[in-house]
Image: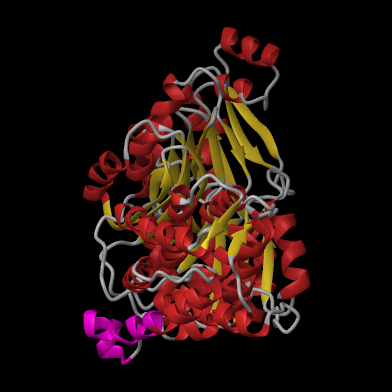
């Protein structure tokens, strides 16, 4: 089949053929994935990237416009190292194509070779022996060939790409040790092989189209060989500095840095130990969207080093120290927090100290949002795949729709394996419910035994929140403005708790913080007349001294120290405000 020129429709048909081949071969690409880390996700990442193009592009006859649309869709939907590298090459190609509705084979070849420089510029440390090498050597071959028939150009170039692929183990020791070729490079060659087959057959009808594998397997990283814990990605728009300045800014914060795209819109990828520092550095320089942060260490441990047969999922409204989350391998999904147009992931890109500083200075009140459907569903699918049984414990359904969303999703997929739990709690009291389940799993209790006692544990858990001011509840719309004014005039200090269904209620009020402390301690003492104490813990919103004072007084009363004292998570601090202290207590019926 002779192809004298390419227009937008022809190029998109060719792209479809290659994309379908990557999707069909995604599991094989996952299997041979060993670089940069052996996280078995190159196939799914490349498949998700090309699928984003297939579903997001409306082709036209104009090849420049079609290529720009393909580039934009790829940059927006790119996943992982190989997916972003492929997207950046497509971006470079769209940039280098001449402004014409159709394209000769020679013009395509020259544009393909010029696009390589965009690819290398996007990377902090380009590594040869990967997809980079194969794309570069293939593109160089194209530019050195004078073939005017596009079909002959691509057919003859395939041998060069295949040879380059076969040589990747010679360039990269990790591949030689594993006796495999580079997975991303193989994905690119599979794309070309499918295009050549299409040229010979001349029809899309024989193409086998299968869906991308279950999204629950997306972005499961292996951090066993990495010094960095978190994989962060985002779309960065209207960037006010150049690519080199961004590299200089980000290089001290991590590695695996890819900046695909241009100043108007780029897809950013970085591995780091402090994603909050990454996004703090980026916020003043442009607009961030589609922010995603994966905990590679937790994903690896819950995939390959499970301590127990029963897993736990919770959300970031649950106040539980990171060391306990890590010890019990608890998967936590993040709520969103917005300060105007600035979006953050609770406890991942926004830590309590930075949040409360913003709360002091930002004029408009921040807003919270539920975890994204993809993060909620991805965590459920991942844990269901790797554990015999899973408890998914969420914040009270009277305070968030997260439990309902999870229940709906679980019922259709994992009803017999994942047990959604409405904790009817929040913050530190939700943390105690999760901790109780974790310790029971650690003790070897069965799934059925834990399930049978969960309702009792929840019913015997209480939170007592000593609120410093109603200002933040008024700003957030939780309390009418008039009530806030009256409370301020009278210097009222409310004590806020949750009723038996998990709905917020004022359980007491005083004219001073000292009276609040006394009332809360007396309430706990009264409850213990006919109940035992399992555990208690304390959280605070920039009120550590007061939290410690509560801890000292309760330690004397209860004969034991709190399980933990920690800062109040930002998504709860949105409503409780600076100065609040929460005491969570789980009682045991005598």
Residue 549 shows up from this direction? no
Q: How many marks?
A: 0
Q: In front here: 499 or 560?
A: 499
Where 366 sits versus 252, above or below? above
Residue 250 shows up from this direction? yes
Q: Position of residue 139 (x, y in %)?
A: 38, 67
Q: How is the image coloured?
A: secondary structure
- Assign the magenta stretch its main secondary structure: helix
Q: Residue at x 51, y 77 (%)?
A: 152
Stretch in magenta: 160-179
Q: In front here: 427 or 37?
A: 37
Q: Residue at x 68, y 23 (%)?
A: 479
Quadrant of the frame with the C terminus: bottom right
Asked if residue 137 is among those painted magenta in the image, a careful observer would answer no
Q: Quadrant of residue 198?
A: bottom right
Q: Position of residue 364 (x, y in %)?
A: 55, 20
Where 539 sits versus 449, above or below? above
Q: Position of residue 587 (x, y in %)?
A: 57, 57
Where 99 sits versus 36, above or below? above
Q: Residue at x 77, y 70 (%)?
A: 411
* Name of the residue lying farthest toward the top: 489
* Name of the residue lying farthest toward the bottom: 179
Q: Residue at x 35, y 59 (%)?
A: 116
Quadrant of the frame with the N terminus: bottom right
Asked if residue 176 is among those painted magenta in the image, a careful observer would answer yes
């Amino acid at each position: 089949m002779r192809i004298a020129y390419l227009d937008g429709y022809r190029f998109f048909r060719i792209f479809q053929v290659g994309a379908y081949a990557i999707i069909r071969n995604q599991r094989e690409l996952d299997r041979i994935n060993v670089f940069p880390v052996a996280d078995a996700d190159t196939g799914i990442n490349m498949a998700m990237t090309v699928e984003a193009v297939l579903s997001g592009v409306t082709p036209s006859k104009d090849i420049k416009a079609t290529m720009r649309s393909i580039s934009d869709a790829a940059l927006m939907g790119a996943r992982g190292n190989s997916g972003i590298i492929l997207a950046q090459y497509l971006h470079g190609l769209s940039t280098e194509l001449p402004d014409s509705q159709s394209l000769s084979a020679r013009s395509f070849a020259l544009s393909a070779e010029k696009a390589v420089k965009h690819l290398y510029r996007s990377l902090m440390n380009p590594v040869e022996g990967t997809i980079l090498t194969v794309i570069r050597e293939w593109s160089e071959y194209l530019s050195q060939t004078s073939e005017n028939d596009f079909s002959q150009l691509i057919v003859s170039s395939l041998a060069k790409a295949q040879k380059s692929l076969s040589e990747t183990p010679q360039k990269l020791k990790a591949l030689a040790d594993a006796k495999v070729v580079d997975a991303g490079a193989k994905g690119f060659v599979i794309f070309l092989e499918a295009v050549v087959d299409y040229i010979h057959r001349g029809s899309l009808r024989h193409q086998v189209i299968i869906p991308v594998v279950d999204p629950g397997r997306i972005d499961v990283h292996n951090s066993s060989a990495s010094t960095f814990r978190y994989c962060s990605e985002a779309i960065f728009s209207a960037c006010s500095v150049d690519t080199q300045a961004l590299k200089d800014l980000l290089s001290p914060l991590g590695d695996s840095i890819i900046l695909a795209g241009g100043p108007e819109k780029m897809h950013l990828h970085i591995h780091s130990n402090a994603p909050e520092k990454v996004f703090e550095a980026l916020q003043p320089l442009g607009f961030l969207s589609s922010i995603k942060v994966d905990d590679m260490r937790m994903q690896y441990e819950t995939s390959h080093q499970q301590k127990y047969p029963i897993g736990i999922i919770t959300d970031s409204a649950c106040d539980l120290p990171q060391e306990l989350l890590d010890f019990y391998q608890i998967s936590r999904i993040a709520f969103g927090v917005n300060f105007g147009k600035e979006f953050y992931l609770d406890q991942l890109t926004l830590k309590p100290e930075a949040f409360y500083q913003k709360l002091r200075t930002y004029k408009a009140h921040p807003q919270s949002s539920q975890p994204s459907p993809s993060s909620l569903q991805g965590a459920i699918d991942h844990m269901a795949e790797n554990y015999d049984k899973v408890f998914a414990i969420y914040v009270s359904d009277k305070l968030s729709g997260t439990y309902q969303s999870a229940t709906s999703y679980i019922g259709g997929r994992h009803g017999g394996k994942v047990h959604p739990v409405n904790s009817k709690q929040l913050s530190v009291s939700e943390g105690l419910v999760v901790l109780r389940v974790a310790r029971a799993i650690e003790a070897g209790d069965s799934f059925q035994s834990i399930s049978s006692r969960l309702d009792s544990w929840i019913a015997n858990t209480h939170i007592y929140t000593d609120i410093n001011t109603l200002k933040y509840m008024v700003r957030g719309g939780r309390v009418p403005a008039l009530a806030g004014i009256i409370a301020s005039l009278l210097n009222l200090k409310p004590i806020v708790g949750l009723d038996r269904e998990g709905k917020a209620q004022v359980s007491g009020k005083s004219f001073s913080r000292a009276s609040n402390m006394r009332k809360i301690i007396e309430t706990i003492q009264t409850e213990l007349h006919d109940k035992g104490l399992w555990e208690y813990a304390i959280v605070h919103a920039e009120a550590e001294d007061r939290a410690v004072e509560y801890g000292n007084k309760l330690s004397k009363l209860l004969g034991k120290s709190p399980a933990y004292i920690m800062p109040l998570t930002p998504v709860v601090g949105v409503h409780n405000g600076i100065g609040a202290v929460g005491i969570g207590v789980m009682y045991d019926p005598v």
